[in-house]
Image (tube, rainbow, N blue to C red):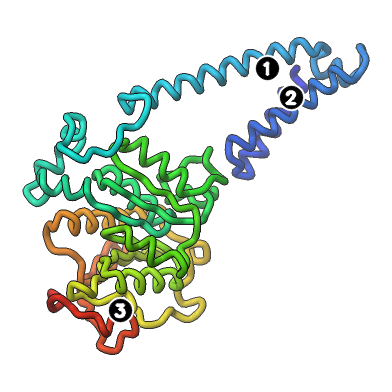
Amino acid sequence: MIFVGAIAAVLWGIGAGMGAPHKARWTMIAILLAAVIGVQLGLPDGHPLRTATGGDVRLWLLILAFAGIGLGYRAALRRLRRVADSGTASPPSPQTGTFSATELNRYSRHVMLREIGGPGQRRLRDARVLVVGAGGLGAPVLQYLAAAGVGTIGVIDDDTIDGSNLQRQVIYRDGWIGSPKVHMAEMAMRELNPFVTVRPYLRRLTPDIAADLIAEYDLVLDGTDNFDTRYLVNQTCTQAGVPLISGAITQWEGQISLYDPARGGPCFQCVFPQAPAAGLAPSCAQAGVAGPLPGVIGSMMALEAVKYICDAGAGLMGRLVIHDALYADTRVVTVKPRPDCPVCAGIVRAKPVPI
């Protein structure tokens, strides 16, 4: 028993030192127990290895039985907590009429705001928002859109959760490593607010699907980390007349703006005509990023989405916000449409860009 316990402790310590998730460590322990049971069944009585590992297979079977009961009890408690938290065994369908008492309580702080109120909260419930990318920026965006009561939230991403994501993508959990981001984000959003509809798309946004997908939504939020996808989203949104809120982060700095050529603003390519040369705009994986920074910029993106949907305050059309977290400095730069922009030069603009 002591010998097996020592091996188990060593395996757990190695797993912890390597940063392996708990699921992987328990898998190693399970393999060890299977090997011990195999020794007990395969070796004769009195064999030194069998004696060192307990000497009787019934002891290990009893331990496994107790462990199974404990795990089953824990899983049952988790299910009961989820039911209790949601108030029902199955998520309620999105409301189409008046708000229920539960919804009114949930959104009461919004309703108190003069700029949102009941009509604004109803606009949020009726809105359809697509989030492109479920990574550093997408994670806080999805959380706050769901919490705010945006009725239909689409999220498209083909990536799976990696251990290195958890330093900043706080919508995910350690036990979800290896799972598709969109499916885990959907589960987290439904647990946060069962009154919203989540549409997960486990795939990369490509030109063959972009137009049809974006046409289904009223607003797009782009938090991707490569210029090819950003240009694709911008071109598709411009052609469809769908406003785009785009954010970007690297190391200690982030930026955000709203691009809406159909209503007088520039498009993304007006501001960033060409992708930077290789190495000038490294990804987070290449250059690093401060953990809370995506939360700051992503929360700003979600806030701008709420403002746009509710027609509250002054939005970021025609303005680019640049946030330097290292020196706690935020600047706002005026941006305008470019007459020679290959994407939006032919767009009929509803009004001049506000300055």
The amino acid sitting under disc 1 is Leu
Disc number placed over residue 271 in the picture, else none: 3
Which label's residue is closer to the chain start, 2 or 1?
2
Would residue 261 appear left or right of 3 to someone viewing this image? left
Name the spot of residue 286 as percent of width and height, x first: 52, 66
- Of 185 and 136, nearer the camera is 185
Name the spot of residue 152 as percent of width and height, x first: 30, 48
Name the spot of residue 140 as percent of width and height, x first: 35, 50
Within 10 Å of the Cα at label 2, are there few (<14), some (14-19), or many (20+) other Cα atoms? some
Label 1 near label 2: C-beta < 8 Å? yes
Question: Could you tell me which residue is drawn at 32 percent across and 65 percent down?
Answer: 246
The residue that mark 1 highlights is 64
Question: Could you tell me which residue is drawn at 31 percent across and 67 percent down?
Answer: 255
Label 3 near label 1: C-beta < 8 Å? no
Question: Could you tell me which residue is drawn at 24 percent across and 43 percent down?
Answer: 149
The total of numbered circles placed on residues is 3
Res. 182 visible in picture: yes
Name the spot of residue 29 as percent of width and height, x first: 69, 29
Q: Secondary structure at mark 1?
A: helix
Res. 326 visible in picture: no
